[in-house]
Image (cartoon, grey):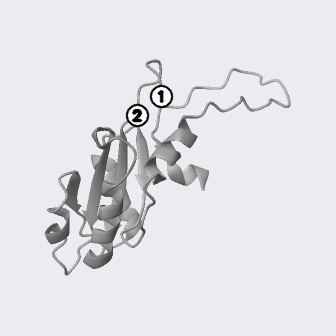
């Protein structure tokens, strides 16, 4: 990206429940991303695991660990969203192994200019602007 479009900061949110082995594999893969480490954070949300998730997350300086006692990955993801600092939000699960270019490719795709949508009929009033919201990889799946 150029100086007009600075490199966006991204937040990667990972909910986890009793899956330390997979989480460590996932975090190792995220530590090898081609996207600059200064431009993303990793937020792991422990969804009330019986395992000590901090035993894994403490091995990774880039990881922030938070807890969510209410069951449900969607609740854990929402907790991660409340902590996220990024203008781009990426979600993955503890049992996923992102490729080394996963984040860079996703952000590149989101950052591409999109052509305006055609209007089929004139609008009586100009559309109201939507409040800014973080881009999400899930919108492109």
Q: Going from the N terminus, do you reach mark 2 or mark 1 first? A: 1
Q: Position of residue 20 (x, y in %)?
A: 25, 76
Instruction: Say left or right for 124 vs 70.
Output: right
Q: Is residue 74 above or below residue 87?
A: below
Kindly check if marks 2 and 1 are in contact, taking CB atoms under 8 A apart as contact: yes
Residues 74 and 12: in front is 12
Q: Is residue 12 above or below residue 124?
A: below
Residues 141 and 2: in front is 2
Q: Is residue 45 above or below residue 114?
A: below
* Mark 1 crowdedness (10 Å alpha carbons): few <14, some 14-19, many ≥20: few
- Residue at position x 43%, y 41% from top? 88
Q: Position of residue 84 (x, y in %)?
A: 31, 46
- Residue at position x 40%, y 67% from top? 93
The quadrant where residue 87 appears: top left
Residue furthest to the top in view is 4
The quadrant where residue 70 appears: bottom left
- Residue at position x 27%, y 60% from top? 44
Q: Look at mark 1 in the image and give the residue it sits on.
A: 1
* Mark 2 crowdedness (10 Å alpha carbons): few <14, some 14-19, many ≥20: some
SS category of the residue bearing label 1: loop
Q: Is residue 68 above or below residue 113?
A: below
Q: Which mark is residue 8?
A: 2
């Amino acid at each position: 990206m150029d100086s007009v479009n600075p490199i966006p900061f991204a937040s990667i949110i990972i909910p986890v429940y009793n899956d330390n082995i997979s989480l460590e594999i996932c975090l190792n893969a995220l530590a090898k991303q081609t996207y600059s480490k200064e431009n993303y954070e990793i937020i792991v949300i422990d969804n009330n695991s019986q395992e000590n998730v901090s035993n894994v997350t403490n091995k990774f300086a880039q990881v922030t660990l938070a807890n969510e006692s209410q069951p449900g990955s969607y609740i854990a993801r929402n907790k991660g969203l409340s902590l996220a600092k990024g203008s781009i939000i990426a979600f993955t699960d503890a049992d996923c192994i992102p490729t080394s270019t996963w984040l860079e490719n996703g952000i590149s795709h989101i950052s591409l200019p999109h052509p305006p949508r055609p209007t089929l009929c004139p609008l009586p009033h100009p559309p109201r602007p939507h409040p800014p919201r973080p881009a999400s990889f899930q919108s492109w799946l």
